[in-house]
Amino acid sequence: MHKLFAAAALCAAFSPLAHAQEAARKDGWSGTGELGLAISKGNTDSQTLIGKLNIAKEDAQWKHSAGASFLYGKQDDVESARRYEVFGSSGYRLSPRSYVLGSARNERDHFTANEYQWTAAIGYGFEAIKNKDTHLTFEVGPGYRWAKLQDLREHKNEAIARGFIDFGHKLTDTTSVYNTLLIEAGSDNTYARNDLGLLVKMTDALALKAGVEVRHNTDVLPGTKKTDTLTTMNVVYGF
């Protein structure tokens, strides 16, 4: 029964993406939508749902990207995870490999030190490697963060330095490895997120992705761990 429920949830989630695929391609956008569902029954009952959406568009002058993600979990009918994130960036090319950019990100998490974090930054980007099999991009620049501590009316706003690395390599015609690293460093807190994974294509549109995501905050509330690790196995729909 749980397997049937999981399959039905995945089909329902990807059905709207299938209808939007052709329209997105006509507008020059490409991207991926992914979903993972884990259900455990026995001594401990738990359910975890993970979803991500990433879109991008490039031309000779502009480089745009945006995305959203969510994580929701329950254990023994008690909520154990609830996180939402949206982000976007736009870059104006100075040359075929370099660009200036502006970026923004908002994250809300009910089980970490900060209830929410807003960040906005400007910077410089450079595509060190860009070919059909491999890409490696660096971004760096100044920004500002607005953050509120969990369950407290206390805000920690500060200037930050933002760094971003995006790497991907095609191992075979069907298998790719990727890694992205985001760092937002300030005097009060440094936030770092690394996402490492392996993607295996099943069809032109569908793939399986195994990933490990590590999030770290240097400044946390007492009793809160600084590092969170999330291991996932998701179905990915590409368009």
Image: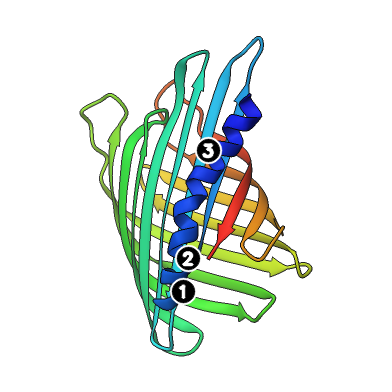
Mark closest to the chain's N terminus, 3 or 1: 3
Q: Secondary structure at mark 2?
A: helix
Residue type at the position of mark 3:
Ala
Q: Which residue is at the far left?
A: 153
* Alpha carbons under labels 1 and 2: distance apart: 6 Å
Estimate the x, y position of residue 192 in percent, counting from the top left.
Answer: 49, 48
How far apart are labels 3 and 2 at the CA level?
19 Å
Disc 2 crowd, CA 10 A, few/some/many (<14, 14-19, 20+): some
Picture disc at residue 21 = 2
Disc 1 target residue? 25
Decide: is 201 above or below 155.
below
Mark 3 lies on residue: 9
Q: Residues within 10 Å of mark 3 (few under 14, many from 20)?
A: some
Residue 129 left/right relative to 60:
right
Q: In this rendering, is residue 102 above or below 6?
A: below
Q: What residue lies at 25% left-to-right and 45% top-to-bottom?
A: 157
Residue 114 visible in the shown view: yes
Residue 229 coordinates in the image, percent (x, y): 59, 37
Residue 92 location, x and y as percent? 36, 81
